[in-house]
Image (tube, grey):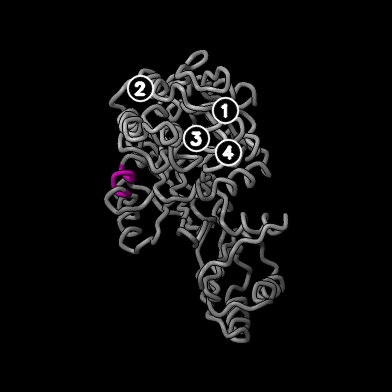
């Protein structure tokens, strides 16, 4: 055969995992003087599958017999197949497809795999990112355009009731990023302005305007000023009570502390109020904050806003400004939001994530996450639940064990 396509042997072992399996196989291969071309190994529920691609020795038959003897001693099945060359080079159009479900049903995975095949794409590798409280699977796909795949899989994901994210396979996924988050109904549960409105006795009216604004039916600045005017005369001490009543979204603290360990930077950009967001940023270890400032005179909320309103366009400007301050390109930013006023920010980011968002936002974002755990975002960045828990354990943070 040509020197460009040398003989190779594909060795596959399967059976019950135990210490010493891999070392025993390599000891057998070492006696034959072969070189390792490629290797893959997985363990699932104590069952091991080991695949080895090695250069073929002068006497493949003798090596094959030796491998079968090693396998018998280990009580494992061994298959040896002779061929030529390395694995094929992965085609262009490589992407990571992250599939998230709670639960993740076989029918949903079948549908996603089918749509990938429909585009001519191939699934080269599959990794589990998490098994609890959601199941997250990362598919390494090649041979299809990520943008075209994203649109096709988004429709299938909605039909199947799961979340699917498609990202190009490039270095940005491994590099430091700036994460920019909305606050109300994203970083925290609920809307601060509605909580203030409850203290002022006008919650139903404010909540109705908020909902319409988040759906994109009202101009955000006009709707905000209208709602703030309803707060006129409210004692500013209500802000302290509202802050004490805030519920941080599940997984938010885990996400921030995990990514800070990797050098990520965080910003919160809110159409809410700086009197709340600045305290949140300090509490959570967030680097940058931008929000509207309520005017307070003599300890009373006047019903006015100081300075320019942080609206839809203002959120996108803040993302670009913070990216410049951190020194990363916009492509290395990720934005997380849920309402229509987040759309420009999501579009400006390299990765726009709609988090439990309105339909208009889910349709426009790069991907949507509809489970109530903000740290699910970590799986989109290639970080597994096992890695998160191991890092927490080193820091003395013990995660409750998942159900068996």
Instruction: Name the disc covering residue 183, or none.
Output: 3
Q: Which residue is mark 1?
A: 275
Q: Secondary structure at mark 3?
A: loop
Q: How far is mark 4 from mark 1, CA to CA?
A: 38 Å
Residue 155 on the magenta span: yes
Mark closest to the chain's N terminus, 4 or 1: 4
Q: Nearer the viewer, residue 303 or 399?
A: 303
Start and end of the magenta stretch?
Answer: 152-157
Mark closest to the chain's N terminus, 3 or 4: 4
Rendered location of residue 258, percent (x, y): 63, 47
Q: Residue drawn at (60%, 59%), measured in percent from left and top?
A: 386
> Can residue 400 be seen in this snapshot?
yes
Given this view, does label 2 or label 3 mark the residue nearer the observer?
2
Q: Residue drawn at (39%, 28%), measured in percent from left and top?
A: 343
Mark 4: few, some, or many residues within 10 Å (few <14, many ≥20)? Answer: few
Mark 2: few, some, or many residues within 10 Å (few <14, many ≥20)? Answer: some
Q: Residue drawn at (37%, 34%), measured in percent from left and top?
A: 203
Q: What secondary structure characterizes most of the magenta part? A: helix
Rendered location of residue 276, percent (x, y): 56, 31
Q: Which residue is mark 2?
A: 223
Mark closest to the chain's N terminus, 1 or 2: 2
Q: How far is mark 1 from mark 3, CA to CA?
A: 13 Å
Rendered location of residue 69, percent (x, y): 61, 84
Given this view, does label 1 or label 3 mark the residue nearer the observer?
1
Mark 3: few, some, or many residues within 10 Å (few <14, many ≥20)? Answer: many
Q: How far is mark 1 from mark 2, CA to CA?
A: 20 Å
Residue 197 on the magenta span: no
State if disc 2 and disc 4 touch (CB < 8 Å).
no
Q: How far is mark 2 from mark 3, CA to CA?
A: 18 Å
Q: Is residue 150 above or below residue 227?
A: below
Q: How far is mark 3 from mark 4, CA to CA?
A: 29 Å
């Amino acid at each position: 055969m040509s020197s460009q396509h040398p003989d190779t042997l594909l060795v596959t072992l399967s059976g019950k995992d135990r210490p010493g399996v891999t070392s025993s196989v390599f000891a057998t291969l070492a006696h034959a003087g072969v070189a390792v071309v490629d290797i893959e190994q997985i363990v699932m529920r104590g069952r091991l599958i080991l695949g080895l691609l090695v250069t073929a020795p002068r006497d493949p038959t003798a090596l094959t017999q030796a491998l079968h003897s090693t396998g018998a001693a280990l009580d494992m099945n061994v298959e040896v197949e002779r061929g030529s060359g390395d694995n094929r080079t992965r085609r262009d159009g490589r992407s990571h497809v992250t599939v998230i479900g709670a639960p993740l049903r076989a029918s949903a995975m079948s549908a996603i795999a089918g749509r990938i095949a429909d585009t001519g794409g191939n699934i080269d590798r599959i990794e589990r990112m998490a098994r609890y409280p959601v199941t997250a699977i990362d598919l390494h796909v090649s041979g299809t355009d990520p943008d075209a795949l994203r649109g096709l899989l988004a429709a299938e994901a909605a039909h199947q009731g799961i979340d699917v994210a498609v990202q190009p396979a490039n270095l940005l996924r491994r590099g430091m990023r700036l994460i920019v988050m909305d606050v109300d109904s994203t970083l925290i549960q609920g809307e601060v302005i509605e909580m203030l409105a409850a203290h002022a006795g006008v919650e139903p009216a404010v909540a109705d305007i908020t909902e319409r604004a988040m759906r994109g039916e009202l101009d955000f600045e006009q709707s905000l000023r209208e709602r703030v005017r309803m707060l006129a005369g409210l004692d500013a001490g209500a802000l302290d009570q509202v802050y004490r009543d805030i519920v941080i979204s599940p997984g938010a603290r885990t996400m921030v502390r995990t990514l800070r360990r990797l050098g990520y930077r965080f910003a919160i950009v809110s159409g809410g109020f700086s009197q709340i967001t600045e305290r949140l940023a300090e509490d959570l270890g967030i680097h940058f904050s931008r929000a509207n400032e309520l005017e307070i005179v003599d300890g009373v909320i006047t019903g006015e806003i100081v300075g320019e309103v942080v609206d839809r366009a203002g959120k996108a400007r803040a993302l670009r400004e913070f990216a410049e301050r951190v020194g990363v390109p916009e492509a290395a930013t990720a934005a997380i939001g849920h309402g229509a006023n987040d759309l420009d920010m999501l579009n400006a980011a390299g990765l726009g994530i709609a988090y439990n968002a309105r339909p208009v936002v889910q349709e426009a974002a790069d991907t949507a996450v509809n489970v109530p755990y903000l740290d699910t975002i970590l799986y989109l960045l290639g970080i597994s639940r096992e890695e998160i828990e191991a890092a927490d354990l080193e820091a003395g943070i013990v995660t409750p064990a998942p159900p068996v």
